[in-house]
Amino acid sequence: MIDAPHGAVGTRHRAWVEIDHGALIANLAALRRLAGPGKQIIAVVKANAYGHGAVEVSRTLSAAGAERLAVATLSEAAELRAAGIDTPIVLLWGIGHGDVDQVLATGVEPMVDNLEAVDWLEQAADRAGSRIGLHLKVDTGLARQGIEPRGALALATAIAASAHLDLAGTMTHLAAVGEEEAFTDVQLQRMATVLDGMAANGIDPGLVHVAATGALLAGVGGFAGAARPGIGLYGLAPRWADGRAAGLTPALSLHALPLRVFEVAPGTPVGYGLRWSASQTARLATLAIGYGDGWPRHHLNNGFALVRGQRVPMVGAISMDGLVVDVSEVDGVTLDEEFVLIGRQGDQEITADEVATQRRTINYEVTTMLRQRLPRRHVGP
Ligand SMILES: Cc1ncc(COP(=O)(O)O)c(C=O)c1O
């Protein structure tokens, strides 16, 4: 067991996140099977690897054969480099003018979707006497980043003609795979047209990548040379898909120990705003996890934990640093009893999807918002 640098697990930490690296490796293998033979995997580890711990996850996935990593920001790339990770990194969210030195320092392959960025990078690479690989992003319909298809050929031509830049890849991102098939087809067609135009003009697009987890699960985007999954590596899937059926296993679980176990008389109000009262004598436990850890106030009288393999309800408001559960139905809960807020205990399970439904959000947000204050325990294999 390794503890992440963000806080040693000790007596002061009564709540923690556990990451199963065996599951990460198995999920990478499952996604690789879906991608098909000969395809590369660009493992998306942005936002602290969706809350799982970017450095440790990147080490494991790189060792397990992920050909590239992908992050959103240069600071995320710098964190991986500082930890000694030398796997190629794609910078998914592009750069500003002031970023070029850090691009060189980290050796990332930035996404580009405009000529200005290409010019900045060309000048920086020229000054440094080095080369920079770029990933040209085409906006085929997500309408967020990327160059419109009609401008893509000119941008690719400029990169191909530059003295110090390489077109390492050409990419797009799908907006509604698994949900809007017709729209997905339009996006894929636009991408195919761009690639045909590049081929007709003798431009090598580099590594083509289109599919994130959803596309892998839906079986689209297979013409590309690489897939770019994030959520599937962590064993979860987009809402419309069944990750378990696809062989994915959640890697993250969330645990807490009680700080206090106590009894209250009927009618005793609990927590800020007195939002819950015991209807009869109740036995309560205070867990040291709150919205300051990324367990939000949506769970006011609306959430569960597992203890001794049984479900117990959260009662009252969530505090910044703690929450209260009603353990009246569970015998013998002590201060050493481990509670699970996400994960399995006995034959019970609380999934990130269940939690997401309670919050009216998606599983991505549930794991990603777990703050660094919660130590990560990295286990196995
Ligand atoms: C550009 C890009 N590619 C790939 C991914 C990974 O997507 P997923 O986590 O659905 O696999 C993301 C996630 O936000 C993304 O923004």
Image: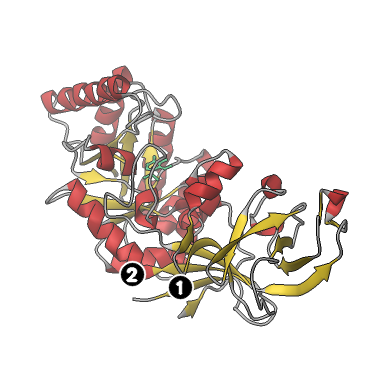
Q: Name the residue under label 1.
A: 378
Dot 1 falls on a residue whose secondary structure is strand
Q: Do the residues labelled 2 and 1 touch (CB within 8 Å)?
A: no
Q: Visible in this render: residue 18?
A: yes
Up the image or down, 37 lies above or below 190; here it is below
Residue 197: where, in percent of width, then height? Answer: 17, 22
Residue in front for this viewpoint, 263 or 108: 263
Residue 302: where, in percent of width, then height? Answer: 66, 48
Q: Is residue 47 shown left or right of residue 202?
A: right
Q: Name the residue under label 2.
A: 22
How packed mark 2 is, by other alpha carbons closer than 10 Å (few <14, some 14-19, many 20 or more), is: some
Picture quarter with ligand 1: top left
Up the image or down, 346 lies above or below 33; here it is below
Q: Quadrant of the C terminus?
A: bottom left
The amino acid marked with disc number 2 is Gly
Q: How is the image coloured?
A: secondary structure
Question: CB at mark 1 closer than 8 A to ligand 1?
Answer: no
Dot 2 falls on a residue whose secondary structure is helix
Q: Quadrant of the N terminus?
A: bottom left
Residue in front for this viewpoint, 346 or 228: 346
Residue 296: where, in percent of width, then height? Answer: 67, 50
Residue 319 in which image quadrant: bottom right
Q: How far apart are the alpha carbons under marks 2 and 1?
A: 10 Å
Q: Is residue 227 shown left or right of residue 290?
A: left
Residue occupying the point 32% across, 21% down:
183
First along the sequence among labels 2 and 1: 2
Residue occupying the point 19% across, 25% down:
192
Up the image or down, 181 lies above or below 337; here it is above
Up the image or down, 202 lies above or below 64; here it is above
Q: Visible in this render: residue 73?
A: no
Residue 4: where, in percent of width, then height? Answer: 52, 73
